[in-house]
Image (tube, rainbow, N blue to C red):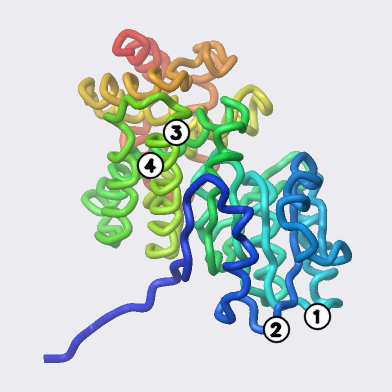
Amino acid sequence: MPLLARMLPTPLHVDVRSGAIADLMHLLGDRRISNEGHIALTIGSGLGDEVLELLGDSIDPQQVFTVSDDSIDTAMSLADDLRRRPVDVLVGIGGGRTLDVAKYAATRAGLPMVAVATSLAHDGVASPVSVLSAGDTRGSFGVATPIAVVVDLAFVRRSPARFLRAGIGDLVSNLSAVADWRLGNEVQGEPIDGLAMALASTAAESIVDQREPTRSDAFLHTLAQSLILSGTAMAVAGTSRPCSGACHEISHAIDQLYPGRATHGEQVAVGTMFAFALREDGAAVRRIGACLRHHGVATTPAELGLTDDELVKAIMAAPHTRPDRFTILEHLALDEAEIARRVRAMSDLV
């Protein structure tokens, strides 16, 4: 019988532990990563001196680029700089925005990229997606999957609480996204990928019932590995579908209507709660809500800095943010009065 297989774009190397950045040069000595040892480094503006001190004299200061924003212009400018230099690998060190710029620039310059995360605010560390800003809007761009992923838990532990809350919210939202993908298959015959769904679901399930302290080694290790799995699910699917459904549509609408109120991860957390409330799955709302509250993640509009009416308006606008995507919002197509009633009902469940 013929054996059918597929090639999956996953990292060659994954390292999740405290002190990982200090050992980065050992990884880069692997000729699968850097053929000639010509390494460029992209760092966030807040960590530069500390990171360079850890790396010592092994990095040429002329090959270090500091990223001050996550704009498409910055990413394209970095790609142009990389093309003019003898570089065979780009290492991005920092939070999600720095890594998104580095992933995009490396892909545009045709270089492999090593993602080194110092915070865990979303599942982009290992994903084939960069979210970049252009003026007042933000867009998602397909990029190459990082060739290696490193998460330094010593830095993650020191990161602001809002970053950890965001990462938890983004991860838990996979449960809603997978439910929406199944719905698209059942109602519209949309093809689904069982492996991608399994990775996304397993990643979320790994933390939803865990009650370790948020900054404990056990929880941070699980959170980091699960966010990497989540990014891998998108690489397997070739789309963000296993990790993005009605929850993300609602978050995109909030960004458009009420920018700067809360982090993406906390917005999708509340979007997830609402999506399961729409499914009249009170058990899931309570289960997910208990996880979010344990870690201090928003579960209500007020905790996002929104009124109930503002959330209702965002939910009404949400389907227009991804007109190609079918979720519980498009399936039910509720009017404004009914959405307002469901928002109030969600608050009662929480």
In this rendering, the count of numbered labels is 4
Q: Mark 2 and mark 1 in contact (Cβ < 8 Å)?
A: yes
* Camera-side mark, 2 or 3: 2
The answer to whether residue 311 is above or below residue 117 is above
On the image, numbered disc 2 is attached to which residue?
36
On the image, numbered disc 4 is attached to which residue?
222
Which residue is situated farthest in the bottom direction here? 1
| Earlier-in-chain disc, 2 versus 3 | 2
Q: What element carries label 1?
A: loop
168 vs 135, left or right, is left
Q: Is mark 2 on a helix, strand or loop?
A: loop
The answer to whether residue 158 is above or below residue 129 is above
Q: Disc 1 residue type?
A: Pro
At 50% across and 12% down in the image, what residue appears?
308
Q: Mark 3 and mark 1 in contact (Cβ < 8 Å)?
A: no
Of residues 64 and 128, the one nearer the viewer is: 64
Q: Distance between the residues labelled 2 and 4?
A: 34 Å
Q: Mark 3 and mark 2 in contact (Cβ < 8 Å)?
A: no
On the image, numbered disc 3 is attached to which residue?
168
Q: Can you give x and y, in whole percent of width and height, for residue 192 in the image?
A: 28, 59
* Camera-side mark, 1 or 2: 2
Which residue is situated farthest in the right direction here? 62
Q: Disc 3 residue type?
A: Ile
| Earlier-in-chain disc, 1 versus 3 | 1
Q: Can you give x and y, in whole percent of width and height, for residue 341 in the image?
A: 36, 13
